[in-house]
Image (cartoon, rainbow, N blue to C red):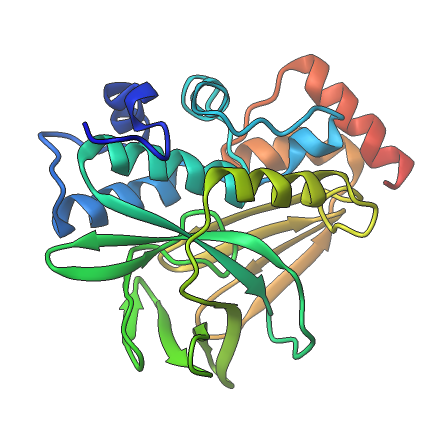
């Protein structure tokens, strides 16, 4: 293996592939990239529960494997995409980190606090992102201006907004929705360490004050934000309901495939009941 940026040499590839349901030999080609990306999104839930439990969000490869592969938990963007970057590097892909500014339909300028990846496969560059959550990609998206692609029942596109700024968009029944913008500058694990510290500790971060748990599937998106559980379908229909504290662990298990220890479930129930 060439010089490691992402810690690919530390990856237990067999354990990871078993976790994401990818069988057979893997190689640095588009078929493998699609299978791993799709399997990762299906296996790992987007969640910020470590922050609410008062534990640091660790980003080294061993910690990510212990939590997400062996512990069968999920994580948010830095955890998810750093693990994917390490796996892809181990397989032999050329991987570059990107920094993105989340928009979610908004127009104000926000800091670059999201991680995505640029990966080379079959002679082309691909936007890979397994860590955005509810509005995120299911598969790699060709990193070309004007691209449009249906993934499951969802449609995504990329537009060049300025000379060096592209925007990932999701098609909704009422038109295109800006998910996030990103530039060409490469980011590295040390950059994501700084972003992660802000996201997991700053009082204005949305991840320190409420649970944010999300899953995207080919025909449905599930979201738990604070006490509100919501589902969204491609036709724009949505359902929302407030989850009482006694249903907390059941919803996490049933809807998001997150199994908590009794100790963590009790701790989260206390956080939930306190309204933080």
Instruction: Confirm whether residue 180 shows in the render.
Output: yes
Query: Which quadrant of the figure has residue 104?
Result: bottom right
Q: Nearer the viewer, residue 95 or 53?
A: 95
Is 212 left, or right, of 183 in this rendering? right
Q: How many marks?
A: 0
Instruction: Confirm whether residue 255 shows in the render.
Output: no
Q: Nearer the viewer, residue 253 or 166?
A: 166
| Residue furthest to the right | 274
Q: Position of residue 31 (x, y in %)?
A: 13, 49
Which quadrant is the C terminus positioned in? top right
Is 9 left, or right, of 190 in this rendering? left
Query: Which quadrant of the figure has residue 168?
Result: bottom left
Residue 272 higher or lower than 158, as above or below: above
Query: Which quadrant of the figure has residue 107?
Result: bottom right
Q: Position of residue 164 (x, y in %)?
A: 43, 75
Q: Nearer the viewer, residue 98 or 266?
A: 98
Q: Position of residue 33 (x, y in %)?
A: 21, 47
Residue at 41% x, 54% y is 186
Is 30 left, or right, of 262 in this rendering? left
Q: Position of residue 258 (x, y in %)?
A: 54, 30
Residue at 62% x, 29% y is 57
Residue at 18% x, 27% y is 1
Residue at 71% x, 54% y is 241
């Amino acid at each position: 293996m060439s010089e490691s940026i992402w810690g690919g040499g530390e990856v237990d590839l067999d354990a990871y592939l078993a976790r994401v349901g990818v069988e057979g030999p893997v190689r640095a080609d588009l078929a493998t990239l699609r299978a791993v990306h799709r399997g990762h999104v299906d296996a790992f839930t987007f969640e910020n529960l470590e922050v609410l439990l008062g534990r640091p969000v660790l980003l080294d490869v061993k910690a990510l494997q212990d939590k997400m592969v062996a512990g069968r938990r999920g994580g948010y963007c830095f955890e998810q995409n750093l693990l994917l970057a390490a796996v892809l590097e181990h397989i032999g892909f050329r991987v570059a980190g990107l920094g993105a500014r989340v928009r979610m339909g908004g127009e104000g300028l926000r800091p670059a606090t999201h991680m995505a990846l640029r990966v080379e496969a079959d002679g082309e560059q691909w936007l890979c992102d397994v860590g955005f959550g509810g509005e995120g990609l299911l598969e790699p998206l060709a990193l070309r201006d004007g691209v449009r692609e249906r993934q499951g029942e969802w449609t995504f596109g990329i537009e060049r907004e300025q000379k060096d700024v592209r925007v990932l968009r999701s098609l909704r029944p009422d038109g295109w929705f800006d998910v996030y913008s990103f530039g060409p500058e490469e980011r590295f694990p040390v950059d994501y360490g700084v972003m992660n510290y802000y996201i997991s500790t700053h009082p204005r971060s949305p991840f320190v004050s409420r649970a944010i748990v999300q899953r995207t599937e080919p025909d449905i998106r599930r979201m738990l934000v604070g006490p509100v559980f919501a589902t969204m379908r491609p036709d724009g229909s949505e359902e929302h309901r407030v989850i009482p504290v006694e249903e907390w662990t059941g919803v996490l298990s049933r809807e998001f495939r997150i199994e908590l220890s009794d100790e963590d479930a009790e701790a989260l129930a206390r956080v939930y009941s306190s309204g933080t």
